[in-house]
Image: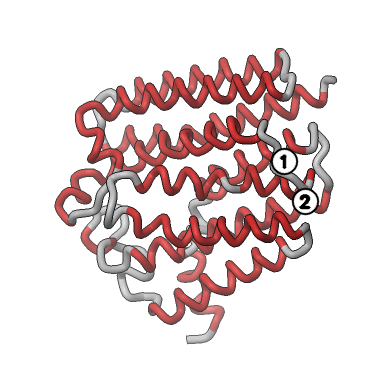
Amino acid sequence: MNLRERLPLYLRLIRFDRPIGSFLLLWPTWWGLWFAAEGRPSLSNLLIFTAGVFLMRSAGCVANDFADRHFDGHVERTRDRPLASGQVSEREAIALGATLALAAFALVLLTNALTVALSVAGLVFALGYPHLKRVTHLPQFGLGVAFSWGIPMAFAAERGELPAVLWPLFVAAALWSVVYDTFYAMVDRDDDLQIGVRSTAILFGAADRLVIAVLQALVLLLLWLAGTQFDMGVPYAVALLLGAALFAWQQYQTRDRSREHCFRAFLNNNFFGLAVFTGIAADYLLR
């Protein structure tokens, strides 16, 4: 087959038709950019990081499917993925993932040495995360680090340093990733138990929604603390109140723990990320 015939399969492999992952990676990256640049990120960094989000999320999808290629066929939600179903070969997947990662690295080379160094660590986190579910019930925390790494990279690109004020924001974003990825893992919990894959959804068990609620409260607390570090005002406070309402809706939505409702709660986190970003952007814009 030629490239035109293979392209639809490659697009499915990188979840081009399901951009939720790109958005969930984009929002904390933009939080970091806007805070680091006090509401005025450079156009070059905005373009570099936005394109980098898409490229690295796509590479991450390939890496995840490659790591899970012997498991996805046993899970209802993933059995038809191109790699698990044999429509795309392992060699093709490796070539595609490497190309995407190299393209993202080429973009980072347009920034500075500190950002480049951090990008190498980010690549290690992205490649390592899919394998954590084999050895620990906490792979969601690995995802949290990987999906929040754009925050220190944004500060490095905009300021050339890593000030202490960025870390509450980083931890908030990392814990938020644990929240939404636990909802996601609750969708697959029954299948994962059968095939031996580990997750926070399995670890938390019957206390899943309670633990998630505690994590959601910590996310809001840390975002508030980050806001005080950057002198955020009313627009940001309103955004956090909206975020709290969205978290409450997610708790209500998952009260029966059904696959469909857990997946809806996962998707709803896109609005949480957007709400926080809108609050940050509006706060700086109105100053």
Find residue 180 and name its label.
none
Which residue position is annotated with label 2? 45
* Vertical relation: 190 (above or below) 210: below
- Is 159 on the left or on the right of 137, as rendered? right
Q: Looking at the picture, does residue 226 appear above or below residue 137?
A: above
The residue depicted at 60 percent of the width and 56 percent of the height is 54
Residue visible at 72% across and 41% down in the picture: 33
Question: Which three-letter amino acid code belongs to the residue tagged 2?
Answer: Asn
Q: Residue furthest top?
A: 234
* Chain-order first, disc 1 or disc 2: 1
> Toward the viewer: 121 or 271?
121
Is 241 displayed left or right of 193 in the figure?
A: right
As drawn, 140 above or below 194: above
Query: Looking at the image, which residue is at 31% across and 37% down?
Result: 260
Image coordinates of residue 145 in percent, x first then y, are 50, 46
Query: Which image quadrant: the C terminus?
Result: top right
Classify residue 286 as left or right of residue 211.
right
User: Which x, y percent locates residue 62?
Assistant: 45, 65
Image x and y of residue 88, in percent: 40, 76
Under circle 1, the secondary element is helix
Residue wearing tag 1: 33
- Identify the amino acid type marked 1: Leu
**Residue 170 placed where, x, y %?**
57, 37
The crowd level at tag 1 (other Cα within 10 Å; few <14, some 14-19, many 20+) is many
CA separation, marks 1 and 2? 8 Å
Q: Are marks 1 and 2 in contact (CB under 8 Å)?
A: yes
